[in-house]
Image: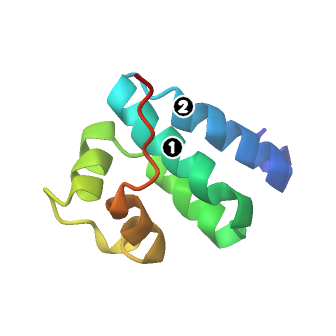
């Protein structure tokens, strides 16, 4: 079934998964990152994010906060953008 999704359908699914991680902190990190950067994503960038969504939240957060080394498959421009954390807008 996932193979039948269009590019836009995959982006919608990724957005939902990014904002429904299970903890508020992970929702803000993953969902905020998605909202800030997805508009210009290519197929490769979306595939990178989809793979990241398969990882455990504690691992992704550690990579983003630089408290654990990022695996080579996730290193690069997108992870560097995630590590800047300039996209997390926490409502008060």
**Residue plotted at (54% across, 56% down):** 49
Q: Quadrant of the C terminus?
A: top left
3 vs 63, nearest the viewer: 63
Viewer-nearest residue: 54 or 23: 23
Q: CA distance from mark 2 to mark 1?
A: 8 Å
Q: Can you name the residue that lies furthest to the front here?
A: 92
Task: Name the N-terminal-most of marks 2 and 1.
Answer: 2
Q: Position of residue 16 (x, y in %)?
A: 63, 32
76, above or below 24, in the image: below
Where in the figure is residue 25, as x and y percent of width and height?
34, 31
When asked about the image quadrant of residue 76, the answer is bottom left
The residue under label 2 is: 19
Q: Is residue 3 left or right of residue 29?
A: right
Q: Quadrant of the rendered structure where residue 1 is?
A: top right
Residue at image mark 1: 32
Q: Residue at x 57, y 49 (%)?
A: 34
**Residue nearer the viewer, 69 or 81:** 81
Q: Position of residue 68 (x, y in %)?
A: 15, 58
Is 55 placed left or right of 51 in the picture?
Answer: left
Could you say where residue 22 lies in the image, as x and y percent from the top left? 40, 22
User: Is residue 70 in sight in this rendering?
Assistant: yes
- Give SS at disc 2: helix
Is residue 50 in view?
no
- Outermost residue on the left side: it is 67
Decide if residue 64 is on the left or right side of residue 42: left
- The 10 Å Cα crowd at callout 1, few under 14, some 14 to 19, many 20 or more, is many
Compared to residue 75, the image places residue 31 above or below, namely: above
Q: Secondary structure at mark 1?
A: helix
Which quadrant of the structure image shows residue 48? Answer: bottom right
Number of other residues with Cα within 10 Å of mark 2, as a class: few under 14, some 14 to 19, many 20 or more: many
């Amino acid at each position: 079934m996932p193979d039948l999704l269009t590019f836009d359908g995959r982006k919608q699914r990724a957005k939902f998964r990014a904002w429904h991680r299970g903890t508020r902190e992970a929702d803000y990190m993953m969902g905020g990152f998605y909202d800030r950067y997805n508009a210009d994503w290519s197929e490769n960038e979306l595939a990178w994010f989809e793979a990241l969504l398969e990882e455990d939240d504690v691992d992704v957060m550690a990579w983003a906060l630089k408290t654990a080394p990022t695996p080579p498959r996730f290193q690069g421009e997108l992870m560097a953008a995630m590590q800047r954390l300039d996209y997390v807008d926490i409502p008060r």
